[in-house]
Image: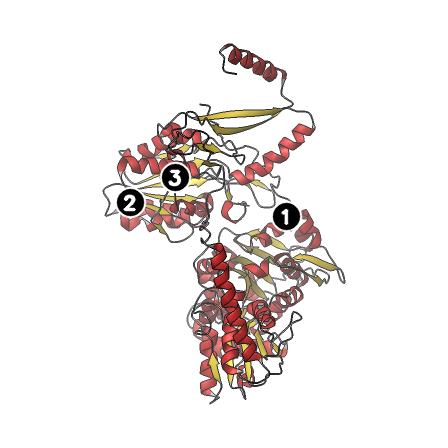
Amino acid sequence: MNLALNHRDPARGSGGMERSFATEVQKLRLGEGEIFHGEAILAITKALLQAGVAYVGGYPGAPVSHLMDVLAEARTPVLEPMGIMFEQSASEAGAAALLGASIHYPLRGAVTWKSIVGTNVASDALSNLASAGVKGGALIIVGEDYGEGASVIQERTHATALKSSLPLLDPRYDMARLVELTETAFDLSEACHLPVIMSLRIRAAHMSGSFTCKDNRPPPYGAHRHLPGAVQDYDRIVLPPSIYEHERDKVENRLPAARAFIRAHGINELIDGSRSNIGIILQGGLHGPVMRALALLGAGDALGNSKVPLLILNAIHPLLPDQITDFCAGKDAVLVIEEGNPAFIEQEIRALAQQEGLETRIFGKGLLPVAGEYTLDVVRKGVANFLAANDRGRGGLGARAKKALKEAEENRIQAARLLKVPPPPRPPGFCTGCPERPVFTALKLLQKERGKIHVSSDIGCNTFSTLPPFNTGSTVLGYGMSLASGGAVGASMDQPTVAVMGDGGFWHNGLSTGAINARWNGHDCVLVVLENGYASATGQQHVPSTGSTPWGKRIRLSITNMLRAIGVRWLKRVNSYDVPETLRTLRAAFDAPEKGLRAVISDNECMLARQRRERIRRVADQRAGKPVSVAKFGVDAAICSADHSCMRLSGCPSLTLGPVADPLREGPPAMVDDSCLDCGLCGSAAHAAALCPSFYRAEAWKNPPRWRSALWRAERKIMQALGAT
């Protein structure tokens, strides 16, 4: 058995970009009157340049990773010539703190991060920023990861905006409107002296469209024109007595100024309809499914016209009380379409209606689900029920809605009948060849020897270990917080606990909150750091240990040196694809005579990033006539015992069930399909667990060197002599 054991490619992080966004960067150069066509997330990036930002930053995470990727590649050709500063911050807290530049100075800045999880990390800085207020426009673009396809806890950013008095925009799905509101957000921020949050949903971020560009605006102050001097103003410091004045100012001046700006600039939109007795109030981000639902119900069309009056809230905080009451006045019923829970908007509208003595009946949760994403089917059902109950006998909308509901139910029943068996669930999992998978194979073998071990999991690709076939991991509490989350558990265990985190999690929060905390408090635990070189789950963004910055500057910080510096004495590095070695190292960590924090670092590059680079190299070498080899693993069906332990230990997508050629076999043999990337895990796992020796490794050569051709001929003659061919 020949095991293919891979080590980190020294070329990684050498300054060359693994991916190119050259096409996207060129779109950022478009000028006045030119037409942009592309994804919304890139259009918003262009809008930042048109708004005259002086600095941009953030932390990568879906669905705004693309924004960070493009800005990183645009730093040298676009941003620096304009005098714009860019950084990929070490965390969302660092990104939010970057906005401190706008407190005293007329500097416009924008930062971005993922969803409520990023907002939680940034909340301390955001609270202080909201209290002090800003002079230059400050914009936070939050990639709202909610609903189908989401990868994080299902909460929204709305509560943060409420508690900190931050204007919150939720733009409708229209490319030109998104760009317009991105630029307007800076004016709003400067008008009310508050940072502004813009919620960008997954579907909005990746929609395509067009808009007419403006020229990019260099900032009035920046790298090319320095500020006249530093400012110190105690009234902007968040200490007593200033904080009391800040709170009063937010309530009496800043929020009223925000409302006045929202009203004066028409940020919210009104669509008049012929049905004056009913209406719908909706978040801007739900405009798409609502309009489609109305069209399917015969109450609207694809051009945005609606027979039902609509109040589209592109600004969902603060609301405009007079705008809400004016819309509701004279109507029998109004439906509030607000995604998620708590129903902040609906509750405020109900309170306003009661306060003003309106007889309008307010509908919302109940006709629509209490929680979850408001997809087209969900919205259509809710709107249809609303119309059927409140528009009876007036032009046919209610009757048509009832008919549509009946047809939809009949279609659902028919689809279930035709499908017969529901499709199986498809949970996420490790990619083929992932260097993290073998570590969990070794952990599974260790638990077979020593019983169940408490493993604290972390955010990132390693979270997939909580799923079959590994079923490893008891808690997930936050990015880089796995080590800290096992502290109290370890005190009640008769063996060390294990914490697993990636290098992204280590640099984000794991060093200070995890490793330093464990060392200081004397926790008896084993830290496993999966150092694959990138923040892989969000698209291979660079981290401090990658070897270069996102824009290609060579610099590498060492996880090993950091752990040594805080006094971790027991530290081993392993080649994760060698499962026996990893298993031996984990045993040694558990049995180490010195207690306290021990660390095992797995050192193999993310396979997606590696293959992206190596495929390009192989094609170039083959075209140049250079020798190129491609290796894959296989299973000898005649030897395979068909107990499938190899699959239960690795879970590799390329390792699957093969055809049954022998009717006397008890089960189908294992088979390695064409997606194999020659990582060696299947053979290494079989060796570590003393499974059947059915795995083999085969190499295919293009332009083979002479010695390889000669060796092949010799091997073939030997096999022929032995009667094996």
Q: Residue furthest front?
A: 663
- Quadrant that contains the N terminus: top left
Q: Is residue 234 visible?
A: no
The residue shown at (41%, 28%) is: 640
Please, is residue 232 above or below residue 636 in the view?
below
Tell me which residue sits at (48%, 88%) in the image.
Answer: 359
Q: Amino acid at mark 3?
A: Phe
What amino acid type is highlighted by mark number 1? Answer: Glu
Q: Which mark is residue 522?
A: 2
Q: Residue 271 location in percent, x, y?
A: 62, 78
Q: Residues within 10 Å of mark 2 (few under 14, many from 20)?
A: few
Between 30 and 186, the one nearer to me in the picture: 30
Q: Which mark is residue 73?
A: 1
**Dividing the picture into quarters, in which one does residue 592 lie?**
top left
Pair 3/1: label in front:
3
In the rendered image of this protein, does residue 334 appear above or below residue 635? Answer: below
What kind of element bears circle 1?
helix
**Who's the residue at 56% across and 37% down the image?**
611
Residue situated in front as seen by the camera: 606 or 214: 606
- Say how the picture is coloured: secondary structure
Q: Report which residue position mark 3 lands on.
A: 440
